[in-house]
Amino acid sequence: MLQVIPIILIIIVSLLYFGDKSSKVNDTVSVVIPAFNEEKSIKHVIDTVKQVKSITEIIVVDDGSTDKTYDIVSKEDVVLIKHKINKGKGSAMKTGLKKVTNNIILFLDADLSEINKKQVESIIRPIIKGNADITKTKFKREAGRVTELTAKPLLQFFFPELSFEQPLSGQFAATKNFLDTIDLEKDYGVDIGIVLDADARGMRIHEVDIGNIVHEMSSLKELNLMANEVVRTIVDRAINYGRLTMVDDLGSSIRMEIMGLSLITLGIFGLFFIRFMTTWMSSFIIIIGLIISILYIIKIIKMSLRIYGQSKVSKKQIFKSFIHMHFPIVISIIILLLLTVSLVGSVTISSNQISIEPASKNLIISTSPEPHKGVDVRGPYTIENALENEEQLIRLPTSALSTLQSQYGDNIYINHEKYQLEQSLEGENDLIRMPELARSNLEVNPGDVIRDSDFKTKFENTQQVKNIKVDENTLDKNLNNTTINVDINHTNASVGTEIKSQQLPEKILTVYVNDTEIGKVLASVTNTSYSIYLNEGYSDTIDLNSNTHGVIYNQTYKNSTIEVVLEDSGANTTTEFANDDSYVKFLNINIDNVTINNTTTTTQKD
């Protein structure tokens, strides 16, 4: 259960930002145009916005111009306001904002000598449709020096969630309801200030591509002034919204917390997996990690509460900003917690001791050339009681079945008691259900967790009867090479095997009927005798050893040719073929479901 908690945290963090907030607003727009010495372009800007139907109010603020800007605008049917002296772009925007009567406000620079109707419409469209609370623009030209050298680096550091291509664009639109809640900067910091305030309040900000525009180039003196005012605005907002604390103090504490969790994880790995690390060394590392983790988690909680209490923005937005700034670190903490919980996830408590043994999965990479073989992840498995009325069944997942080198329907003999192997129920992928008697003989209990590498060992000295039967694909492939048909429904074989502890050279036993492969089984042979049966009746006894290979049995029975071949696989195995001393038969071949009457006296086997 504990292992699921970090995964749930990841899902919650990942889903935090999704949700549909769209709601259509009033579609009438006021445009505010701050202008300072823009006699060359101001008339074109006014004429352009007049073409947009949704713009019902045009306000031009002459910010102390010394050229003919005021005279040109005074001839137009617009609201004209004049500052006696130049107060700055932000002041001009604040003056215009006081006069607007519509809820959607568009701010345009007065030096856009080639702006067109479509570009203006694209800026206000997302707000009119209710898809955004504020829109800012980007356009097809390289970002300026102020943007690249000052704005972007600072924003990436303090406000990483704002990944805008051109954060300082002066063309943007917003709702009056929002603009009335913030204090506009008086200078060039006004544009970025509005964007940062909108982000802090959780507003939906869209960056709109308006294509090509022509802007009047600023002088080096103006660029220097702009850079200073932009930097001041970003740093002020970072202080006001707790970003400095998040990045500096809180970020440092989070990194120390990661170090503490990393030390705990290293110590746990040292206890279980690293041979040269002694128990005392690993325990010391774990204790140091615990001390660091506890100290800094307390600091993180205290600082977080202080930020929450002092911040001017909503708690939800603070949390979202925190996740944006420290997302990789937060994910690292969750992963470390997941690793730590997983390592101590298998705990056994008895009357006089507590046992902690990590139950890991087993990665199996097959080197077999056979199809359908590849990479498989198996285990660990949990032992549970058998279902009602299933006292002769053992239910297990396909991964455990592969470890036993068996297939569903095979029989397994545990202390001479016969059980059939069947598939696990849906949703019980790592659960093994077995009857009480089988558990007692294997010395396992309900709730025991067994690693895949230990699973086969639990079945040591048990015997299996593996059923093999020709499949239709094999039959279709081989049928053209013989004139004798094979009855699929009545031609099959069973092979007995035993699970041992010793590794021996693996052999491949293949059974052919009428040159058609019935099936194959992999196991080892020892230097002893093995008996073959036809239709449950004794047929022959052969002596085998590790050097035996080739055809070991050839018999004709009722117009059917039977051939058994033994070959080397090139691998080793702990599974042995059942010999004459075993409880089960080595090989029984059934043909046409007819029993042979054999007069030879033999010991009855399953």
Image (cartoon, rainbow, N blue to C red):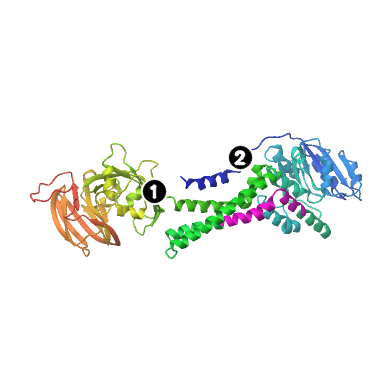
Foreground disc of the pair 1, 2? 1
Residue 251 sits inside the magenta stretch: yes
Residue 10 sits inside the magenta stretch: no
Q: Secondary structure at mark 1?
A: strand
Numbered tag placed on residue 89 in the rendering = none
> Which span of residues is magenta-colored?
232-258
Mark 1: few/some/many CA within 10 Å (<14, 14-19, 20+): few
Left or right: 285 in relation to 90: left
Image coordinates of residue 301 in percent, x first then y, are 61, 48
Q: Does the rendering let one see residue 436?
A: yes
- For disc 1, the marked residue is 349
- For disc 2, the marked residue is 19
Mark 2: few/some/many CA within 10 Å (<14, 14-19, 20+): few
Tell me if label 1 and label 2 are in contact, CB under 8 Å.
no
> In the rendered structure, which amino acid carries the disc numbered 1?
Ile
Residue 99 figure quarter: top right
Q: Nearer the viewer, residue 369 or 154?
A: 154
Answer above or below: position of 96 versus 544: above
Image coordinates of residue 535 in percent, x first then y, are 16, 47
Q: Does the rendering let one see residue 328?
A: no
Q: Residue at x 84, y 46 (%)?
A: 91
Q: Main secondary structure of the magenta part?
A: helix
> In the rendered structure, which amino acid carries the disc numbered 2?
Gly
Ranked by sequence position, the earlier of labels 1 and 2 is 2
Q: CA distance from mark 1 to mark 2?
A: 46 Å
Image coordinates of residue 109 in percent, x first then y, are 80, 48
Image coordinates of residue 150 in percent, x first then y, are 73, 57
